[in-house]
């Protein structure tokens, strides 16, 4: 099953994000078999990270919740809000995905 995890940083969380980022990236590396897509949510001008978005392939909601809770960003209290939703793939064109 596919699950999205939409996380918004708490106000003034920039330094916490920076200091926790190496552990967060290590966690993502260790979780490669679950992550379909992930990346930071950005301000409109693309200058600052303001949250995180994950699309996971995991058996159920409990697995998505466990992944979210195990993220060092979550453990550090970076996120003001976390929304987990099941999603069904309708269409995907990898050729459109650019950095």
Image: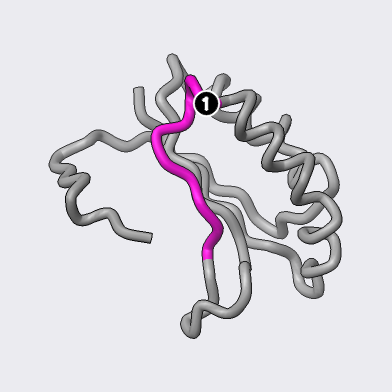
Which residue has dot 1 on it?
A: 32
Q: Establish if 44 lies above or below 55.
A: below
Q: Give the magenta part as a residue range.
A: 32-41
Quadrant of the drawing holding the C terminus: bottom left
Query: Helix, strand, or loop for circle 1?
Result: loop
Image point (18%, 50%), residue name = 95
Measured as percent of width and height from the top left, residue 5 is found at 51, 43
Q: Which is nearer the eye, 29 or 84?
A: 29
Image point (71%, 34%), residue name = 26
Q: Is residue 38 magenta?
A: yes
Quick check: 94 left or right of 22?
A: left
Q: Main secondary structure of the magenta part?
A: strand
Quadrant of the drawing holding the N terminus: top left
Q: Which is nearer the eye, 75 or 17?
A: 17
Measured as percent of width and height from the top left, residue 16 is found at 84, 60
Image point (61%, 30%), residue name = 29
Quick check: 81 left or right of 61?
A: right
Q: Is residue 98 magenta?
A: no
User: Residue 68, located in which quarter of the rendered image?
Assistant: top right
Q: Which is nearer the eye, 25 or 63?
A: 25
Q: Establish if 29 lies above or below 40.
A: above
Quick check: 54 left or right of 98?
A: right
User: Residue 80, located in which quarter of the rendered image?
Assistant: bottom right
Q: Residues within 10 Å of mark 1 (few under 14, many from 20)?
A: few
Measured as percent of width and height from the top left, residue 27 is found at 69, 32
Q: Establish if 16 lies above or below 72.
A: below
Q: Which is nearer the eye, 76 or 65?
A: 76
Measured as percent of width and height from the top left, residue 52 is found at 57, 54
Image point (21%, 45%), residue name = 94
Q: How is the image coloured?
A: one colour
Residue found at the very far top of the displayed protein: 59
């Amino acid at each position: 099953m596919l699950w999205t995890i939409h996380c918004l940083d708490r106000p003034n969380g920039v330094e916490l994000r920076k200091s926790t980022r190496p552990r967060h990236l290590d966690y993502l590396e260790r979780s490669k078999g679950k992550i379909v897509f992930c990346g930071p949510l950005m301000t409109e001008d693309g200058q600052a990270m303001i949250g995180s978005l994950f699309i996971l392939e995991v058996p159920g909601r409990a697995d998505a919740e466990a992944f979210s809770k195990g993220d060092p960003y979550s453990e550090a209290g970076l996120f003001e809000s976390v929304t987990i939703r099941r999603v069904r793939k309708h269409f995907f064109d990898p050729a459109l995905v650019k950095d």
